Image (cartoon, helix red, strand yellow):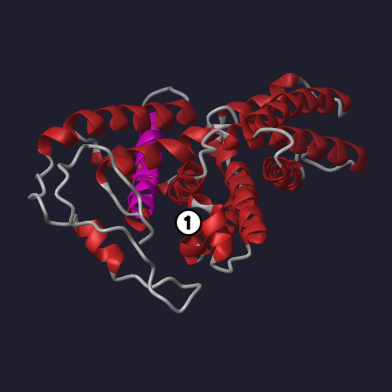
Amino acid sequence: MIDWAQVAQMLASPLMQRAMLVALIVGAAAPVVGTFLVQRRMALMGDGIGHVALTGVALGWLVGSWAGLVPQDSLALPGAVVAAVVGSVVIELVRERGRTSGDLALALMFYGGIAGGVLLIKVAGGTNANLVSYLFGSISTVSSADLAWTVALAVLILVVGVGLRHALFAVSQDEEFARASGLPVRVLSMVVATLAALTVTVAMRVVGALLVSALMIVPVAIAQIVARSFSRTMLLASGVGAGVSIVGLVLTYWQDIPPGATIVVLAIVLYAAVAVLHPVLRRPVPAGDPHPDLVDDLLIVDDVQDEPVCLPDVTDKTPRTGKATLTSG
């Protein structure tokens, strides 16, 4: 049976209150950006940025050490934000110019970031153990200052990501079509890269740099099985991310297990369950009837031009498969 006294004690703990707020808002924000990365076929971008952010953490330690700040890692999160944004912009520029493939650019950032972090933390007088909480997450040690930073950045991510979702979807889906439609493709691509960088830095304290991509991508993979429109995928993925983050955090309160790994394992288990059960439980759509999600998409007018969005005919007689096709909605 549930011991409600212990539940009340957990909810009354200031430490758990901060941790649950961070888990809720980061879990909701990370998949929003992950939805764009999946559309751009850059699902592993979070890994590369996460390792670059470690260099920023170490730079924050170094500056804090030179300035005599207490605690010494007071500038770790601001340093991570700066390094992650710079790294994401570099990745985007390399990908855009085509001189180096996107996956190679990510690999360079991946290895260079973690090597730079280990080197700089030594120069700052710290040890590799100081990077552990950023590598694997340490949500249970979130301070009030961390909470303020995290909430502010996560709210910014949600506002920009949701507010610009139609334009960002167009750029993520087909850059040439977006450019022909008059969209500022380069600016919007940089917005996606910057949002990814900010997401990585806020999610580092929840699941750690090594697992940050999982919180961004796995909820999207779950949502894509169920939803067929882009907006519904984003909404469902955000809910899944928030849900598994809260459940994982609560489990770590009762059991001595790492929260970051628990959250990711829960998300992957949920993905496996949905992938197995959805084809069995879903209601078949009669031949010739458009999927409800696609009907909703037909009613949406593009935000960036006066003409309605031209979508393909959804009333074809081709039998449906289990594969999901996302459309802007």
Label 1 neighbour load within 10 Å: few <14, some 14-19, many 20+: many
- Res. 328 image quadrant: bottom left
The secondary structure that dominates the magenta segment is helix
Rendering coords of residue 180 (x, y %): 56, 64
Rendering coords of residue 304 (x, y %): 50, 72
Q: Is residue 306 magenta?
A: no
Q: Is residue 255 above or below residue 191?
A: above
Please report the residue visible at 47 percent of the width from the left and 45 percent of the height from the top. 39
- Res. 10 image quadrant: top left
Rendering coords of residue 296 (x, y %): 26, 65
Q: Is residue 77 visible from the viewing direction of this image?
A: no
Q: Nearer the viewer, residue 315 or 280?
A: 315
Residue sitting at the far right: 66
Please report the residue visible at 54 percent of the width from the left and 35 percent of the height from the top. 212
The residue that label 1 is drawn on is 169
Q: Is residue 241 above or below residue 113?
A: below
Q: Secondary structure at mark 1?
A: helix
Rendering coords of residue 30 (x, y %): 49, 46
**Quick one: quadrant of the N terminus?**
top left
Q: Is residue 245 magenta?
A: yes
- Res. 310 image quadrant: bottom left
**Quick one: quadrant of the C terminus?**
bottom left
Q: Is residue 99 left or right of residue 26?
A: right
Q: Nearer the viewer, residue 68 or 44?
A: 44
Q: Is residue 242 left or right of residue 78?
A: left
Please report the residue visible at 59 percent of the width from the left and 59 percent of the height from the top. 152
Q: Is residue 3 visible from the viewing direction of this image?
A: yes
Q: Is residue 192 left or right of residue 318?
A: right
Q: Amino acid at mark 1?
A: Phe
Please report the residue visible at 67 percent of the width from the left and 26 percent of the height from the top. 107
Query: In the rendered structure, which segment of residues is drawn in magenta?
Result: 233-254
Q: Is residue 80 left or right of residue 242?
A: right
